[in-house]
Amino acid sequence: DPVTATAVGDHRFDDRWPDASDAGRAERLAFVERWLERLREGAPGAAGVAPVAGADERADREVLVRALEAMRFQDTELLDDRWDPLTWVYVLGAGIFPLLAREFAPLAVRLASVAGRLEGLPAVLGAARSQLVGAPGRPVSRFHVETALRQLPGVGELADEAVTAAEAAPDDPDAAALILRLKAAAALAHDSLGAFETHLREVTLPTSEGEGRLGPELFAAKLRHTLFVDLTPADLLARAEREYAAVRAEMIRLARDLWPSWLPDRPMPSAAGAGGQGAADSATVRGVLDAIAVEHARPEELLERCRAEVAAIEAFCRAGDIVGLADEPLEIRWTPVFLRAFGGAMLDSPGPLDKAEKSFFCITPIPPAWTPEQVESYLREENERMLRVLTIHEAVPGHYLQGVYANRNPSLPRTILWSGVFAEGWAVYVTQVMMDLGYGADDPALLLVHWKFYLRAVTNAMIDVGIHAAAMTEDEAIGLMVDGGFQEESEARNKWDRARLTSTQLSTYFVGSTLLWEIELEGRRRAAVAAGDPRGAAAVPEPRVVGGFGDTPGFRYREHLERVLGHGSPPIPVLRALLFEA
């Protein structure tokens, strides 16, 4: 897969595309079966074969087997390249964007690779047309086609950026030839993209239907391959519902304390006046959050606010010796057009073979077509305090720092084949750690906004299950997020779209964070026993809501966090074995 190779920093094939034909699929499946057989021969206890030696070797083998099984699932059961045209948009964008954005080689070398990929676009899009006919029992998703049509122009913009970059480059003896090649390749790409857009609009769209909901069986199967833990959709939903109740209770407690300072001229809602205690509690939380949300940046200020917050967070981490920081470059920028379908923010880390390359903390700009009411709703959701929490999550000590630590690990399986459950779980988990350690403790409103952010992770899992394994309606999903999760309607509607465009990924935040809290609980209990606490493991009871452990004899956060970060980005069961069973 040359596009994945580019992403991880293997640049030998940067001018090529994957083989997207049926023959390519068959070759991938043969590769999977061949390597699964060889890895199983080396499994512990296999007859006549010495077991894999050492905890790191066992972990790498486990990661490889799980990744190969997930590849087989993709090419035999999920088959999203046959019913989801966004799959192709992402492949195209991911094949070109890193070559322009990451400075791993001289510009001329990278632009020559871009030219090669642009010249190969007709073949890729030809394969896309032949593949996008639906899978057995699963037609092409109409909602995904409509979204792909909106995002596809972003690929053409990348082609134009390449030409502009070549024309602006310093004089070079070979520059003229490269510019001519790129212009021809870009023209070819635009023609191919235009033909593909016409095909999607005139051939694929009329026969498409639905929203791409997986259904209970396929969702459960994909969930197993995503999470790598035995958690059924029903189990996941039950966990999320318990956490939902606990977090809301904490938010109600905080909102009652904050009401007098934020809404001094208004009486706090009462059970009698609001239609019951539950309604009064929700109105109290919503009232305080609405008052907090008034304090927000202007649209053009979002990037600069996040840059300033990174500096403040790093100063706090240094002062408290919380975790070792990194010098690898971080660029805070607007999200590339081809990735704007989901809205919000994201972190794009360099591959483990691209040493010292920059990470991108991307924020999706407000669409120019939005009404003033939509813009205000968005900015109220991403208010001053939410941006502070978001920066912890995406940058330090969240995704950016975790990616840096992962790429320093010598295990290629645990860096290249990284676990989204670990990565997303880490960013949610460590945000709560920062709150527990006193970040923003002089601003109690920040803690309430943090709980709202965490509640978003919980409701993400609930709508993920509800949409793909049940029959959750739009009104039910929006009601859960707005009325239950206190989100602004613009955020909730973006998430409704994202939940239908994806599956299982929205559950990784909640599941990953809870599994990492279980690891911390185990680490604290072992530390208490080792320190000779007479209560033993009972010295650390399970908390009522995540975090908030306080001091534990023998437990130091920096040591714990760096141990967790020090094993790449493995599935969390593999991480647990490395931490406690090695």
Image: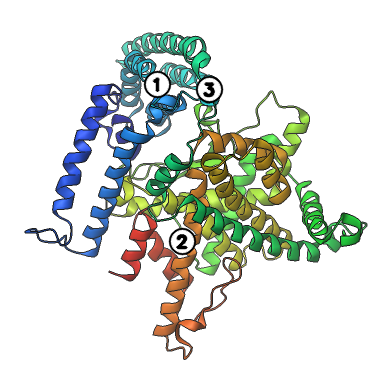
* Residue that numbered label 3 is attached to: 209
x and y percent of residue 470 in the render? Answer: 55, 42
Callout 2 crowding tier (Cα within 10 Å): few <14, some 14–19, many ≥20: many
Number of residues whose C-alpha sits closer than 10 Å to that of mark 3, classed few (under 14), some (14–19) or many (20 or more): some
- Drawn side of residue 286 relative to residue 10, left or right: right
Placement of the C terminus among the 4 image quadrants = bottom left
Q: Residue furthest left?
A: 48
Q: Which residue type does callout 1 highlight?
A: Pro
Q: Residues within 10 Å of mark 1 (few under 14, many from 20)?
A: few
In the rendered image, residue 89, in percent from the top left (x then y), is placed at 44, 25
Is 303 rendered above or below residue 93? below
Whether residue 114 sits left or right of residue 273 in the image: it is left
User: Which residue is disc 1 drawn over?
Assistant: 170
**Residue 5 occupies quadrant:** top left
Judged by depth in the image, the label closer to the viewer, 1 or 2, is 2
Amino acid found under the numbered disc labelled 3: Glu
* Contact flag, marks 1 and 3 (Cβ < 8 Å): no
Q: From the viewer's side, name the closer residue of 494 and 355.
A: 494
Of callouts 1 and 3, the N-terminal one: 1
Residue ID at (23%, 28%): 26
Q: Tag 2: residue type? A: Leu
Assign a secondary structure to mark 3: loop
Residue 515 circle label: 2
Kindly state the secondary structure of the residue where label 1 is placed.
loop
Classify the position of the N terminus by image quarter: top left
Q: Nearer the viewer, residue 187 or 483?
A: 483
Q: Position of residue 416 (x, y in %)?
A: 32, 45
CA gap, disc 1 and disc 3: 50 Å
Query: Which x, y percent locates residue 52?
Result: 16, 60
Mark 1 or 2, nearer chain start: 1
Between 234 and 449, the residue placed more toward the observer is: 234
